[in-house]
Image (spheres, rainbow, N blue to C red):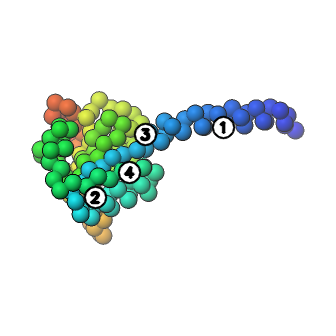
Amino acid sequence: MRNPITTTWLAAILALGLFSSMPALAASSAITMVKNTGCVCCERWAAAMQKTGFDVTTQEQPDITAIKDKLGVPQALRSCHTATAGGYIFEGHVPPDLVAKVLKTHPKIAGLAVPGMPLKAPGMDAAGVTTPYQVIAFTKDGQTSVYAQR
């Protein structure tokens, strides 16, 4: 038989722990995506991110080159949209689980990129495509390395 007072205190402690961590969870799941006006695959990437628990704010502009320049996205890694979260840059169709991993582990990189628009990447949704693609990590000084192969 459990002691009701102990059970009540335990429940209260657990609830306080949960509620005190909620703002951190909300902050880490907030992403801002800037995309070219009318780009449908960007909207599908945002939907894939939202489906996995991210809160995506979308900004549309006729040309996002200046934003990529300002953030320091290497020219060779550029894609159709640029997202930021937790001080990191996510260029193109980066898979949601890798965004979450970066936000959780805080690697010493500027961000991740999926150059171009690979048909297998989240948001591109090409049925039956099995061609692998790479997710590239990049630093502020332009160094790159393969972060993941998908």
Residue at 43% from the left image edge and 39% from the top image edge: 28
Residue under numbered circle 1 = 15
The reply to whether discs 2 and 1 touch (Cβ–Cβ < 8 Å) is: no
Instruction: Estimate the x, y position of residue 149 in percent, counting from the top left.
Output: 27, 49
Neighbour tally class for label 3: few under 14, some 14-19, many 20 plus, Cα within 10 Å:
some
> Spatial distance from mark 4 to mark 1, Cα to Cα?
27 Å
In the figure, residue 43 lies in which quadrant? Answer: bottom left
Rate crowding at label 2 as few (under 14), some (14 to 19) or many (20 or more) other CA atoms within 10 Å: many
Count residues near mark 1 (Cα–Cα under 10 Å), then give few for <14, some for 14-19, many for 20+: few
**x%, y% of residue 150?**
29, 52
Label 4: element kind: strand
Residue type, mark 2 in image: Cys
Q: In what quadrant of the picture does the N terminus appear?
A: top right
Residue at the spot of label 4 = 56
Q: Position of residue 44 (x, y in %)?
A: 33, 61
Q: Amino acid at mark 3?
A: Ser
Q: Earlier in the sequence, mark 2 or mark 1?
A: 1
Q: Which mark is residue 28?
A: 3
Q: Residue furthest right?
A: 1
User: Measured from the top left, where is residue 77 in percent x and y?
Assistant: 16, 46
Q: Which residue is drawn at the image coordinates 66% and 37% (left, top)?
A: 15
**Residue 136 versus residue 120 in the image, above or below:** above
Of the image marks 3 and 1, the number of the one nearer the N terminus = 1
- Number of residues whose C-alpha sits closer than 10 Å to that of mark 4, classed few (under 14), some (14–19) or many (20 or more): some
Sequence-wise, which precedes: disc 2 or disc 3?
3
Disc 3 from disc 1: Cα separation? 20 Å
Q: CA distance from mark 2 to mark 1?
A: 37 Å
SS state under label 2: helix
Residue wearing tag 2: 42
Q: Amino acid at mark 4?
A: Val
